[in-house]
Image (cartoon, rainbow, N blue to C red):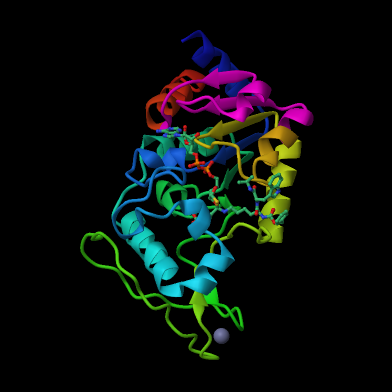
């Protein structure tokens, strides 16, 4: 409780807030985190080896099927109290930037319309040849155990469509990375939520904020390498912790 009060005070006094999120914020909505074991068709693979250009090149049907299954899964769940609390922070602290590593759209659906996606999106596939965006079929019903699926062809050039995410070894979208760096450098408080802090350059964002003088508040049930730089560590799940943080920072 003492830590929560301290974090709430920092947040309420901040002029500029940066919120930096990872897979953990969507876990309580029912979206598995990146480092959770894969299930169904993909149980003998690990996410780190599927999220690569090499995996897509070697077996496009396996990888495209995985992303379509994940898009279906995300479409069938709802934002949780953690996403809602982030939108509430934006409403209370007008200079708030939401920076996410997540490829889901749960921040947007909770009302954080301007969130910066460092690792792309499940909803923005594009052509591997001409980079033209592709339109995907609407998904209906519940996602099943998953299946191999041939990637669609580009309507403009016939090239193979790929997921609009950032794989290992690829560059992050320049504008998103620049916006994240700027928000981190300018922030008085950076709130890092549900990320293992292991994947670079994204993991540099909270570290940059700390170096630039921001107080880093971390929400995560597990220890992470960011514990060291955090002014306050809130060891708990996002959906359980963030609403309390918001009501303490801005009591009605
Ligand atoms: C809860 C919770 C609850 C659970 N509430 N919390 C410098 C040093 C070393 C290596 C590199 C380096 N610079 C670059 C690299 C290489 C590489 C890298 O970082 N590798 C590391 C593994 C070491 N980076 C790259 O390749 C990047 N590109 C790049 O740098 O290009 C130039 C370059 C290339 C090659 C060499 C050098 C330079 C690109 C990285 C792209 C990452 N993309 C992915 C996949 C996206 C698509 C997809 O989803 O399939 O993005 S990887 C994956 O990790 C995904 C995530 O956004 C990202 C971060 O994961 P996140 O969000 O932290 O999730 P988890 O699962 O790790 O953690 C969940 C956390 O939640 C845990 O802490 C739980 O405790 C917590 N939690 N329940 C709150 N209820
Ligand atoms: Zn094309």
Residues drawn in magenta:
209-238
Direction from residue 203 to residue 243 in the image, left or right: left
Residue 50 x/y as whole percent: 48, 59
**Residue 242 is inside the magenta segment:** no
Q: Quadrant of residue 24?
A: top left
Direction from residue 152 to residue 118 in the image, left or right: right
Kindly tell me whether residue 238 is visible in this rendering.
Answer: yes
Q: Quadrant of residue 69?
A: bottom left
The front one of 146 and 134 is: 146
Residue at screen point 52% across, 66% down: 55
Spot the residue most to the left.
141
Spot the residue most to the bottom.
157
Residue 191 x/y as whole percent: 58, 31
Residue at screen point 70% across, 40% down: 204
Residue at screen point 65% across, 40% down: 203
Residue 28 x/y as whole percent: 35, 38
């Amino acid at each position: 409780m003492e830590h929560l009060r301290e974090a709430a005070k920092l947040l309420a006094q901040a002029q500029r807030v940066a919120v930096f999120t990872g897979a953990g914020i969507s876990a309580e909505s029912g979206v598995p985190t990146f480092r959770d074991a894969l299930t169904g068709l993909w149980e003998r693979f690990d996410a780190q080896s599927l999220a690569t250009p090499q995996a897509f090149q070697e077996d496009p049907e396996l990888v495209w099927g995985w992303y379509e299954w994940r898009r279906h899964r995300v479409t069938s769940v709802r934002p949780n109290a953690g996403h809602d609390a982030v939108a509430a922070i934006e409403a209370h602290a007008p200079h708030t930037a939401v920076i996410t590593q997540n490829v889901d759209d749960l921040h947007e659906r909770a009302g954080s319309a301007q969130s910066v996606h460092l690792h792309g999106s499940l909803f923005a596939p594009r052509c591997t040849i001409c980079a033209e965006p592709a339109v995907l079929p609407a998904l209906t019903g519940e996602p099943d155990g998953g299946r191999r699926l041939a990637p669609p062809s580009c309507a403009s050039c016939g090239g193979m469509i790929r997921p609009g995410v950032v794989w290992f070894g690829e560059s992050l979208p320049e504008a998103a990375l620049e916006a994240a760096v700027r928000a981190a450098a300018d922030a008085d408080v950076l709130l890092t939520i549900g990320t293992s802090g292991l994947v670079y350059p994204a993991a540099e964002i909270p570290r940059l904020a700390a170096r630039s003088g921001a107080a880093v508040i971390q929400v995560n049930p597990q220890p992470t390498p960011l514990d060291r730089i955090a002014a306050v560590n809130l060891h708990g799940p996002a959906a359980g912790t963030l609403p309390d943080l918001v009501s303490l920072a801005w009591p009605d």
